[in-house]
Image (cartoon, rainbow, N blue to C red):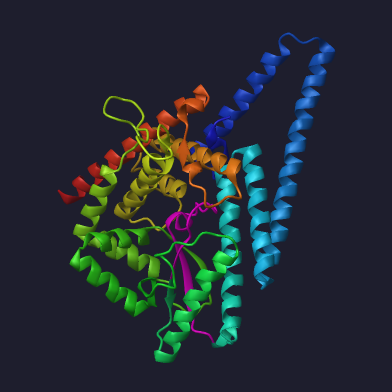
Amino acid sequence: MKALVSAKGGDVLAWRAGADFAATFRQALLARLEFCRTNEAEALLSGAGLALDDLIAANDTFRRHCTDLLEEVPGCGEPLRLKALTTTFYAGLYGHVGVHHSAPAFYEFSTRFLVALSGSVIRTAHASLGLPERQAPQVRLIALGPAGRLEFSPFCPLQLMLVHSEAGEAERELLSRLGRLIHEGFEACGLLVDATVTPRNPEWSGSMPEWRQRLGQRLEQGQMDDLIDLCRLADQSELYCDGGVAVEFAPLCRSLLKECQSAMAFQVTRVCNLSHGIGMMGGLRLKKNGPYRGQFALRDNALQPLSAAVSVLALLKGLETSSTPERIREILSRHELDVDTAERLLQAWHALHELRLTREYDLQPDWSNEAPLHLNVGALPDSDQRLLRESLEAVGAIQRLVGQTFSSMED
């Protein structure tokens, strides 16, 4: 089955993938039927239909179970119960991946769970501060990194930041405590939280005026570490908002990044210099030392360069979408990307994330284990090895396109 069969929407890519799947399924059945007697053929066709019905029923059960958990999470204030719900929810998602191999389905439900969990964590934090929600400082909790691109799995350290209403000294103390409680709340649920990009770090919490000043100063100074941090702001999604904080934060970040020539030049150079996993002699780049010696670094040589390249291209094109597939589709819809390249990129995104999630499935719920991000390429089936190489070639192509796009905009 083509990975693109799980693509959404009415574009040519989704229809093409659906047609490919139907043709492949039909051909597989015909091949099995070729040497069957009449009664055997009838049994095979009946069995295939029943198997599809069973898959549909199991998928419906999965969705109902997810919905039940999603309805329970927001009103739950008990850390132990929230941790149990988190473990149960992701066990169900990985079970679904094991059968359907659908990265979009995993990330869709994972994002919905993260949003529901954020509401519970923040309400619990308000209660710990002894404040009713309506009297607490108004905040917007934003996810960056994989969660900001709507690609969160519990193996990813959760990167979080706060935008809050303007605050006096007394409220600042409350906000500092709130940031710490939010960080601890997610950790209590069993999730990994980034040690630096977290609302308990004052550098990742501030009001709109403070963020505007902070971003302007750091872009002007152009220090490498600051630019790396600021690049994170290109990928963000909202997890919680109490309705009292300005909504223009994401457009502000993207606008400031795009308008700063030095920041964009830095990002483009950085993206183009990332390894896409294929060496100069055509072989795959494998780890030369350490515990994963001889294995392929999936994050460093595939996932990161793909997401970073599409993120920078989205900035250059002025997109407001967050997820990598939607960004690719939007650039295609603007006729700024040809269908073949868009299809190769979507195929690469699906293939690489399926590899990642399948590896995570084997090790979950050991979410601190980094083994899923390394592949023993020799142990993969030939078809997966071929798909991995095609995906890496597509990553290299989008990196080159980013460089060409930026150069043409400079001229």
Q: Is residue 141 visible?
A: yes
User: Residue 24 at what x, y percent from top left?
Assistant: 60, 23
- Residue visible at 30% across and 64% down? 255
Is residue 401 rendered to the left or right of residue 26? left
Up-down relation of residue 63 to residue 142 (above or below): above
- Residue visible at 48% across and 46% down? 370
Of residues 240 and 43, the one drawn nearer to the viewer in this rendering: 240
- Residue visible at 36% across and 59% down? 232
Quadrant of res 272:
top left
User: Residue 108 at what x, y percent from top left?
Assistant: 57, 52
Quadrant of res 398:
top left
Quadrant of the rendering where the N terminus is positioned = top right
Q: Is residue 246 visible?
A: no
Q: Which span is picked out in magenta?
A: 136-161
Q: Is residue 157 magenta?
A: yes
Name, please, the residue furthest toward the front: 290
Is residue 241 rendered to the left or right of residue 89? left
Q: Is residue 219 magenta?
A: no
Up-down relation of residue 77 to residue 88 (above or below): below
Of residues 297 and 242, the one drawn nearer to the viewer in this rendering: 297
